[in-house]
Image (tube, rainbow, N blue to C red):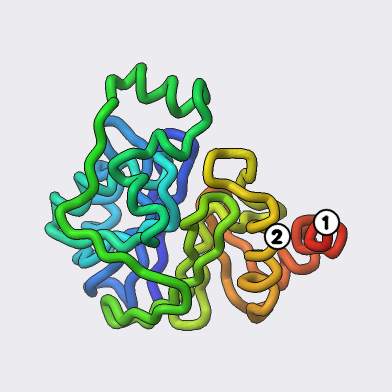
């Protein structure tokens, strides 16, 4: 399997490009914030591996993961896959941002006030299984960072975790639509049952494994998971 990353200029959001091999169809996950958009980072990666994108997958509706989804989808005539709860954030990303927060200020500086969802949006739900670009993808709904956060398990070996799980960390739970209780439930029910060998490709930072996080992450220990 070919997995490469094109980090966004703003917040370093990992935009993952996943394909069975070079010279094949691929998926693109979470095209983030770059100027004017993230396509000028994605295109060279696609050309280097001779890949043809056929789907954009969105882990959640925060702007640093969705900013470039419309130009990506329109540029390659591909659909976007998103959980129905976070779909509204494609056109109204400010609904999940802290008033006066850094992203609000950044969008004002960039003159971006209006957003729209791509022409074709496909809603996906928990445990749904998709076959895209020759890969088997299972949807894992894992609310907490946002109400509609999802992760993508690819071929039962690779987990694109968005902002649910990082190396020694998790996504914030103090934002609109976030929930600390929901995050703990997602970690208990969606992360802990996974095999130690699963490779985690997070929304920010370095790759890790479930086994490493099970051992080292303070957020996968009983002190955090059992908190009420």
Q: Quadrant of residue 93?
A: top left
Numbered disc 1: secondary structure: loop
Residue at 70%, 60% in the rendered image: 184
User: Could you tell me how far apart the alpha carbons at marks 2 and 1 are, in whole angstroms?
Assistant: 8 Å
Asked whether the beta carbons under mark 2 and mark 1 sit within 8 Å of each other, the answer is yes
Identify residue for label 2: 184
Asked if 83 appears above or below 193 in the picture, the reply is above
Q: Position of residue 182 (x, y in %)?
A: 64, 58
- Mark closer to the chain start, 2 or 1: 2
Point out the residue furthest to the top here. Answer: 109
Q: Position of residue 205 (x, y in %)?
A: 57, 49
Q: Is residue 167 left or right of residue 160?
A: right
Residue at 57%, 66% in the rendered image: 200
Quadrant housing the C terminus: bottom right
Residue 198 seen in render = yes
Q: Is residue 198 left or right of residue 23?
A: right
Residue 5 seen in render = no
Question: What number is the disc on residue 227?
Answer: 1
Neighbourhood count class around disc 1 (C-alpha, 10 Å): few under 14, some 14–19, many 20 upward: few
Asked if 182 appears above or below 128 in the picture, the reply is above
Q: Position of residue 187 (x, y in %)?
A: 67, 65
């Amino acid at each position: 399997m070919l997995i490469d990353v094109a980090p966004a200029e703003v917040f370093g959001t990992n935009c993952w490009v996943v394909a069975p091999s070079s010279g094949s169809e691929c998926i693109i996950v979470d095209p983030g914030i770059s100027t004017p958009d993230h396509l000028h980072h994605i295109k060279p990666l696609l050309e280097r591996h001779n890949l043809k994108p056929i789907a954009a997958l969105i882990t959640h509706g925060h702007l640093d993961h969705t900013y470039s989804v419309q130009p990506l989808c329109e540029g390659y005539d591909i659909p976007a896959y998103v959980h129905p709860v976070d779909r509204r954030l494609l056109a109204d990303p400010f609904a999940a941002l802290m008033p006066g927060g850094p992203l609000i200020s950044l969008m004002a500086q960039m003159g971006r006030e209006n957003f729209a969802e791509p022409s074709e949006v496909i809603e996906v739900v928990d445990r749904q299984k998709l076959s895209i670009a020759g890969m088997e993808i299972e949807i894992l709904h894992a609310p907490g960072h946002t109400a509609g956060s999802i992760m993508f398990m690819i071929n039962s070996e690779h987990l694109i975790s968005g902002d649910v799980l990082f190396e020694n960390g998790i996504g914030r739970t103090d934002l609109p639509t976030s929930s600390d209780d929901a995050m703990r439930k997602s970690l208990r029910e969606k992360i802990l049952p996974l095999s130690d060998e699963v490779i985690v490709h997070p929304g920010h930072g370095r790759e890790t494994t479930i086994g490493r996080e099970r051992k080292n992450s303070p957020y996968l220990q009983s002190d955090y998971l059992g908190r009420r």
